[in-house]
């Protein structure tokens, strides 16, 4: 069996409880220097790409902004365009919503980034069925789940049609003949669909990698199908070995129905890590980070999302309250809703009783831990084994500190992966498609 190469990317942390903004080493979430630091660290480590999330509205809890959202949510493509000037090879991936944007304009913005970066742009396609977010936009309201994926599929298809409408050799630049564009080399796009109508010619020639890489983040059946049909990379939550293997096999088998091969879609779960000089030190660091990530206010906030009521009167270091969940609309706005809060609450109550957990300890237990914990050698081995076992093609690393949270991984884990022959020692191509082996 051919040994698979590990793919790695860096996620800029923020707007969730992965980030530990109260740590003295934590910096600004919106200062450009923070983006530069993390991007340059990722490029020094020869990672595939730098990844930015997006939030179109500050989430609310009981009508108040949650502290973790106040750190700021800059617009992704603006930041990435600036980073194109201070990086040379690193891919630049931005999350942009397909529910509240228009294909022609977004295709221009993404193609512009691809040109500015000489072929390093990627678009993480997300959708929103949230009326709370929709209130910020002209259409307002929301789309049903099926409709939002239908709109996203039409959106991506139309964007590709626009990007492909210029022939590869469209620009002649023949001064002697006085011809800049070859006759007939720019096609006219005429699209009439359920969600969009576009008529005209695209304003930009093909970019160095042809068109931006498409990333999709979603775990529902509709999301998996959308990724199998249209994505180059899928960003998933399945970082554990057995969960990852099931997800990997499921999505890869779907590719055949769209005439695609398994290597044409890279599966890259988002993962966290905690390192130490010994396994014991790494475990201690992981526990410390988790307690920083789930402070008293965050613990109560998680509890309120499940119980659907104000729980601020309860001690986060005390036991779960006897009160039952309120099954009405809940208290949280702008987050992915919990499908069966009664079942989740029952599960939490049973776990707390079994292990004698306080509210805060329970939230720490159920919201996960660092995916990879150990010495640099053991973390490198775990990452490599996941990829070789068919649980992932690589990982998107989510550090807990801004902007220096990736430094130790690049300095200590990447060299071990390189020594194992699992990760590149130098970029061998210039575009993101080269890095991801999608060409």
Image: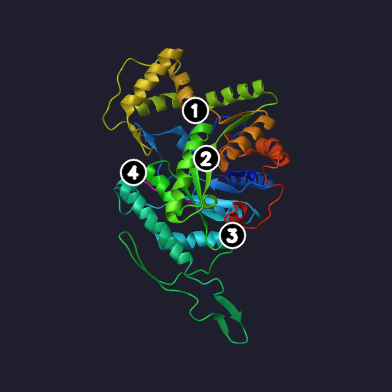
Tag 3, which secondary structure? loop
Residue reaching furthest right?
419
Earlier along the polypeptide chain: callout 3 or callout 2? 3
Q: Label for residue 368?
A: 1
Q: Which residue is mark 2?
A: 269
Choose between 152 and 135: the one closer to the eye.
Answer: 152
- For disc 3, the marked residue is 119
The percent position of residue 361, horizontal first and vertical second, equals: 48, 19
Residue 188 belongs to magenta span: no
The residue at the far left in this view is 328
Q: For the point 47% across and 37% down, which residue is it?
A: 246
Colour scheme in the image? rainbow
Q: Nearer the viewer, residue 423 or 209?
A: 423
Q: Quadrant of residue 151?
A: bottom left
Depth check, mark 3 against mark 2: the one in front is 2
Quadrant for the C terminus in the image: bottom right
Q: CA distance from mark 3 to mark 2?
A: 24 Å
Which callout, 4 or 2, points at the residue further toward the start of the chain?
Answer: 4
Does label 4 or label 3 sit earlier along the sequence? 3
2 or 1: tag closer to the N-terminus: 2
What residue span does the magenta drawing correspond to?
Answer: 123-130
Residues tagged 4 and 2 counted as in contact (Cβ below 8 A): no
* Picture disc at residue 130: 4
Task: Classify mark 4: residues with Cα within 10 Å, few (<14), some (14-19) or many (20+).
Answer: many
Residue 143 spot, x, y in % from top left = 30, 48
Q: Are marks 2 and 1 in contact (CB under 8 Å)?
A: no
Is label 4 in contact with label 3 (beta carbons under 8 Å)?
no
């Amino acid at each position: 069996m051919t040994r698979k190469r590990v793919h790695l990317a860096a996620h800029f942390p923020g707007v969730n409880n992965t980030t530990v903004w109260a740590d003295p080493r934590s910096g600004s979430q919106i200062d450009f220097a923070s983006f530069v630091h993390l991007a340059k660290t990722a490029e020094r480590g020869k990672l595939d790409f730098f990844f930015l999330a997006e939030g179109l509205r500050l989430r609310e809890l009981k009508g108040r902004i949650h502290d973790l959202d106040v750190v700021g949510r800059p617009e992704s493509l603006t930041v990435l365009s600036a980073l194109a000037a201070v990086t040379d090879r690193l891919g630049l991936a931005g999350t942009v919503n397909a529910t509240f944007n228009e294909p022609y304009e977004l295709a221009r913005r993404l193609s512009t980034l691809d040109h500015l970066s000489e072929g390093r742009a990627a678009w993480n396609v997300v959708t929103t069925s949230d009326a709370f977010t929709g209130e910020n936009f002209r259409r307002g309201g929301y789309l049903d789940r099926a409709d939002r994926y239908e709109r996203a599929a039409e959106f991506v298809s139309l964007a590709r049609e626009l990007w492909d409408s210029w022939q590869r050799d469209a620009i002649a630049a023949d001064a002697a003949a006085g011809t800049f564009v070859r006759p007939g080399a720019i096609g006219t796009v005429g699209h009439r669909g359920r969600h969009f109508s576009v008529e005209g010619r695209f304003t930009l020639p093909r970019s160095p990698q042809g068109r931006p890489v498409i990333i999709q983040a979603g775990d529902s059946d509709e999301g998996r199908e959308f990724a199998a049909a249209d994505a180059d990379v899928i960003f998933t939550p399945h970082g554990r070995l057995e969960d990852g293997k099931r997800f990997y096999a499921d999505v890869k088998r779907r590719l055949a129905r769209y005439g695609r091969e398994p290597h044409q879609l890279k599966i890259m779960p988002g993962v966290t890590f905690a390192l130490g000089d010994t396994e014991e030190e790494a475990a201690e660091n992981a526990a410390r980070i988790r307690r920083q990530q789930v402070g008293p206010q965050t613990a109560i906030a998680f509890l309120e999302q499940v119980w659907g009521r104000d729980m601020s009167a309860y001690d986060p270091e005390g036991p779960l309250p006897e009160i039952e969940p309120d099954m009405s609309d809940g208290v949280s706005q702008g987050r992915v809703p919990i499908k069966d809060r009664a079942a989740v609450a029952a599960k939490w109550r049973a776990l707390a009783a079994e292990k004698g957990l306080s509210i805060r300890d329970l939230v720490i237990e159920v919201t996960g831990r660092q995916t990879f914990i150990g010495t640099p050698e053991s973390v490198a081995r775990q990452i490599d084994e996941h990829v070789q076992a068919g649980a992932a093609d690589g990982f998107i690393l989510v550090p807990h500190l801004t902007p220096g949270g990736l430094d130790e991984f690049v300095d200590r884990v990447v060299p071990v992966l390189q020594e194992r022959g699992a990760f590149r020692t130098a970029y061998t191509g210039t575009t993101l498609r080269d890095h991801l082996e999608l060409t």
